[in-house]
Structures are given as C-alpha cells and as structure tokens.
Amino acid sequence: MRLSQKTLPWIGREVQTGDYDRDTQSVGIVHFGIGAFHRAHQAWYTDAAMNAGERDWMITGVSLRSGSVADQLNPQDGMFTLTERSSRGRTTRVIGSVREVLIAGDGQDAIVARIASPDCHVISFTVTEKGYCRTTDGDLDFEAAAAGFYPIVTDALHRRRAAGLGGLTLLSCDNLSGNGRVLSRLFGEWLEYSAPDLAGWFAAECRTPNSMVDRIVPATTPADLTTLIAQLGLRDEGAVFTEEFSQWVVEDNFAGPRPHWEDYGAQVVADVAPYESAKLRMLNGAHSLLAYCGLQAGHTFVHEAVADPSLRALTLRLMRDEAAPTIATSAGQDLVAYADALLARFANPDINHRLVQIAMDGSQKLPQRWLETLAANQRDGQACPAILQGLAAWICHLRGANGAVDDPLAEKLATAAREAEPTVALFSNCGLLPSMWQPSMADRAVISAHLHR
Ligand code: CS2
C-alpha cells in the first residue's frame, strides 16, 4: 500500500506526523522545481509552520519537464517522508505541506490559476543553475527561457494585475551569487522583450529576496525506498533522505505575507551576501573539488573522497587558504569553524552522496564556486593551487575520463577541453565560461602540469 492521506493512520508508530487539517487550507506557495532538495528544505520548514498553527501555506509543486515527481507524489496526496540520517540514528517524519504537483505543458492553465489566485503570495524556485537560462555573458537566453518558467509566471502576473491583485514574492533558492538579484534582472529582461507593459508593475509590486539554502540531499535510490517500507509499513515513492543539518538564510524583502519560517530554524536577515559567498565558495566549491578530483581517484561517494588523506588536505586548502580569505564575513561568522563543520558533514557515512551528481552542470556551477575565488585571489596576488588542480580534473572530466558529461554545454566543452590550450579555450575572453577570471601564464602552466601527470 502507498502512503496517502487515507493510509496515514497505519504508518509505523515511530514515524512523526503532523496534525494540521490539510484539506481546508489553501495554496499560498507555488514552487518551480520540486525535486528532493525542495522537499527536504522549504517544504519541511513550511510543514513545521503549519504544524504550529500557521494556515494556508500549502504548496503546489511544478515540474517543468518530467512527470516523475508528479507520479511519485500525486497518488500520495502530495505526502512524503523525510528521513534524517546521522551518527545519532535516524528520524522519519511525514511532510504534509505539498498539495499537488502540476506539470508545465498540460498543466499550464492550472499553474497559472494557482499563481493568479488571491491566496498565493510566494512563487519559489529550485530550478538549478541552468534553469535561469543565462548566456555565458550572464544575460537572458530568450530561446531557452521561452521553454522555462518565464512565460508561465508572466501569464499569471498578467492575470493578477488584470484582477487588481497585488504583486508576489519571487524567491530563488538556487546556488547562484545574489540569486534574487539575478532572478529580478533576468525576469526584467524577459518582460522588456515579451511583455513590456508588465515591466513597471513587476518592478513596483513584486520582490525577489536573495536567499542561501543549505542542506545536503542526495538523490533517493530504489534501495532507500525498499528499506523504508519495513519502517513505514507503507510504500513511499516520494521519500527523501538527508542530513540533520539545515540552514536557510533569507533576505527580509517580501511583497506580502509569508510563513514565519524564522520561528522554525530559518534566519531572516537584512543581508544574505556573507552567508551566501561562504556557502558557495566553501561548501559548494569543496564539493566540486571532491567531485572532479574524487572521480579521478576512483571514488564514488563524497564520504569516500573526503576520507582520502590527499583529497582531504586539498579540500581544506581550498576552503581555508583560497576561499575563506575572499569572504567579507558578518559579525560572529567563524570561517575556520565553518570549514571544520563542513568536513564533518561531508564525512557522514550515512549520506551516500554521489560524486557524479555534483559533477554535473560544471559550466553553470563553477563560476560562483571557483572562478569568483580565483578572481579575488588574483587581485590580491595569491595563488590557488587547489582550485587549479580541480580545474585540471574538470578538464579531464570534460574529455570523458568519467564517462558521459552531463552539462547543457557538454559538446562545446568537450571540444574546448581537447584543444592544445584548453584553459584558454574555456576561460579566455571569448571562452565558454564567463570571463570573470583570466588565467595567467603561471596558472596555465600549473593546470597543464596536472594534465600531463
Ligand atoms: C551540490 C549541492 O549537487 C551539487 O552541486 O554541491 O547540491 C549541495 O549539496 C547543496 O548546495 C548543499 O546545500
């Protein structure tokens, strides 16, 4: 039997469940990109809010391409379990905050209607870095955007304005520097081109807070689902498994009401930037290093790569010596302690986080994870041997060393990586990555030495 509202009373006794009445609550949030990450993060905080008595924050999830999450969650009335795995054991909780999953395409009218409803106050996004549809220069790629969330949100905003409703908060939860600012700029570019009449209304009525989200959530495997049945007594196709740690720092910049997420562990602050650069350059930067160098060394999971003494030392060097000095901390932020805490999280043997999952979409991830750090150190005359070694491992990855490359620019990257001077083809002014960092002759020599090792 599948988990659902009807079968919930039969769930295993040690599984925590909420006690709010889901059916009478309206949808206050429409979320684009309802993968494992959102389910283990924003949906979990929102479930906590409704469990404490806040009302009308049910979430409609939107899948832009595949119907797989809809197949997992809709037969379960949107319900799924979240299991935290740590050295102290496991705890499992049923999350009830998701009402339904709609798929763009056939479901477009329903998605527009949810956003255009007076009950909706927040549209949030975990569409991954490539979901923002940026060109190498960081501008909007209009052709790609036309197949993404942009036209759907535009239709819905037209409807809201025509109905005399107020604007909304567009909350990006993706790993981009200044994600809210980026979303606002790109959406503004989209409107100027496709709906110029709406651009002024959007700027005046809507808000796009920056936010930093942090929780390690590996893709759920079939084996995870099978093991869970014994505990639940039910089958849960939408289950997510994550670490105990969770952090969400959101800029206090909303167009209207929102759940009081800060009462359930989130931080609502005036400026997200220091948290965000620490997270992107240290956590995500270290992740990408472990991914490319770890795959090269024959590892499969993050916890295996970080147990390898030479990779551990390299990761520490990236975090402490290369990334940390480039971050302007806010009061009370201790980056040495942060680096140690990250190493402990990466070492969690109960989280089977695959290096290939992190290795995908390097062209979209590396600018904010490595290139910003490289550029800042270059300005200060400091070398970055760990990141340069990582870049060499990425070039090997692009040449096919670890199998097929999963990246929207895969073909072009493979060609560039095979050139006699791959560093120039990838990073020079007209290379494939944003030109925020220009490798010096010395950098090129270090990368080349790694490639010829
Ligand atoms: C990872 C992130 O897949 C990746 O590239 O680095 O998803 C990472 O696990 C999260 O940002 C942690 O908050």
Image (cartoon, rainbow, N blue to C red):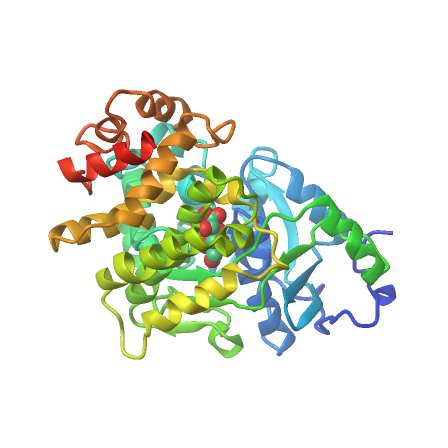
Q: Is residue 374 left or right of residue 27?
A: left
Quadrant of residue 441 in the image?
Answer: top left
Going by the image, does 188 lie left or right of 306?
left
State whether residue 266 is above or below residue 164: below
Lateral position of residue 187 relative to residue 303, left or right: left
Image quarter of the C terminus: top left
Q: Nearer the viewer, residue 6 or 413?
A: 413
The x, y position of residue 336, in whole percent, is: 34, 70
How many numbered discs, if any? 0
Residue at x-position 53% and y-position 60%: 347
Q: Is residue 440 visible?
A: no
450 to 224, vertically: above or below: above
User: Camera-side residue: 227 or 193?
Assistant: 227
- Picture layout, residue 396 above or below residue 71: above
In the image, is 42 to the left or to the right of 132?
A: right
Q: Position of residue 201 (x, y in %)?
A: 30, 52
**296, 28: nearer the viewer:** 296
The residue under the point 52% across, 28% down is 403
Residue drawn at x 38%, y 28% is 409
Q: Position of residue 225 (x, y in %)?
A: 75, 50
